[in-house]
Amino acid sequence: MVKKNIFSLGLVLLGCLGVALLTQATACSTAGNTEAPVKPEDFVRIDHQNLIKPNGEKLFIVGTNLGNWLNPEGYMFGFDKTNSAHFIDEMLRQMVGPDFTDEFWRLFKDNYITRSDVEFIASTGANTIRLPFHYRLFTDEDYMGLKSAQDGFERIDSVVTWCRDNGLYLILDMHNAPGGQTGDNIDDSYGYPWLFESEQSQKLMCDIWRNIADRYKNETTILGYELINEPIPHYWENKDSLNALVEPLHKRCVKAIREVDTNHIILIGGTQWNSNFAPFKDSTYDDKLMYTCHRYGGGASKEAISHFIEFRDSVDLPMYMGEIGHNTDEWQADFCRVMREVNIGYTFWPYKKVDNSCFNAITRPEGWDKIVEFAEADRSTYEKIRLARPNQELARKALLDFIENSKCAKCIPQKGYIESLGLTVK
């Protein structure tokens, strides 16, 4: 009876979401490829180290990242070992089967981020959202419950519409590039930054960005395109030779974008987790470049980010802190004051995850500990998978309950966290 009720609940949810998606598709039909006349001055522009809005006012970026939605990351579910998108997907298929896993991902994408979440972010006084995405959302590769006809544009169209309706700017961030740019869970890769040794992967990356730029070339809600997230970690022995390959790939990708879109800003992140800008020797190959740094921990002082400031001043272009967070409210408040003082805008990571250290916290549902136990278990053989697998009714109910708890109305706003960023909770 329990099993029957769980499947019935899933079917009812899917039916309701089907109607919602049809409505969403209609609402999103105006997002992307708009034919309305636009002029260069309708977009956010660069004036030396500042961003300028179309009305002539300075834009100081303050906001958050929609991490985990289109690029699942283990720790935001409460997992440790199972820490990348394909690890999570494989674990779920081992635990509850391929069909239920596909259903879970569809429900997850439909509910984890919705219009209500964007409205909540806007209500805090934020002005910008950074949207991380996986390149597979724009290919026919197996990803998040779909084997083909991926829904990347449908998802971005939705966020564009919601941001436009709420007066927010949007940054598109390729968080997971073809072949992998880090060789770690951050990019859902296979243990090495193969992107920089693969002509096929580099071409695919450029082609995807060209297609994205072509669709959104007239969309003024989009602030810019962040080409690649956190390339080349510090621990690779050949990091210097890999570092040297990053700027040429940037130039190639920018050239592809400029074939169709000359309006949007291009965001360039440093190597070694967006912290090292020394490999970049040329800031003049495009007239709409800005830079983006990341930082977790360390001192909350101007001196702690002096290398970012010095590089910014040397190129006389904007610098923005695309990721920061996972610290105490006191540290964050102190550091946000520093960033405002030195004119470095910020989007904190992430907007939503289990427990805390985010804008909106997800409560772990009953039975979630069994999901975590399986995710952390030794599953190196089929026998070990069988022995570790939890009760199916319990596991499937916990997964559906997680989706329910992840809805904006069910999340718990983290007041101290939000206020530490200079924002408010109504």
Image (cartoon, rainbow, N blue to C red):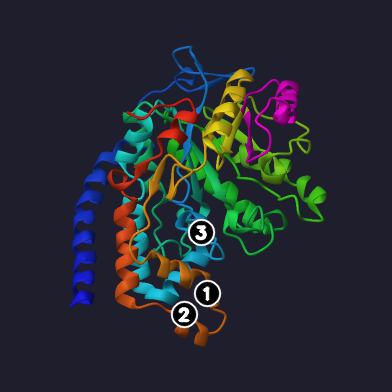
How packed is label 3: few (under 14 Cα within 10 Å), some, or many (20 or more)?
Answer: many
* Outermost residue to the top: 56
In the picture of the structure, the residue carrying the numbered disc 2 is 388
Which of marks 1 and 3 precedes in the sequence? 3
* Vertical arrangement, residue 264 with respect to residue 23, above or below: above
Q: Amino acid at mark 1?
A: Ala
Residue at figure coordinates x 53%, y 42% from the top left:
173
Residue 200: percent from the left, percent from the top? 64, 58
The verdict on residue 300 being magenta is yes
Q: CA distance from mark 2 to mark 3?
A: 19 Å
Circles 2 and 3 in contact, beta carbons < 8 Å: no
Which callout, 3 or 1, points to the residue nearer the camera?
A: 1
Q: Could you tell me how many numbered marks the image carries? A: 3
Q: Position of residue 145 (x, y in %)?
A: 39, 64
- Compared with 220, 113 (above or below) is below
Residue 13: image x %, image y %?
Answer: 22, 59
The mark that comes first in sequence, 2 or 3, is 3
Task: Kindly tell me whether residue 36 is visible in this rendering.
Answer: yes
Say which residue label 1 marks. 377
Magenta-colored span: 290-319
* Quadrant of the rendered image containing residue 369: bottom left
The quadrant of the image that shows the C terminus is top left
Q: Which residue is mark 3?
A: 74
Cα distance between the residues tagged 3 and 1: 14 Å
**Magenta region includes residue 171:** no
Report the quarter where the N terminus lies.
bottom left
Residue 90 visible in this rendered orientation of the protein: no
Residues at circles 3 and 1 in contact by the CB criterion of under 8 Å: no
x, y (%) of residue 157? 37, 41
Tell me whether circle 2 and circle 1 mark residues in contact (CB < 8 Å). Answer: yes
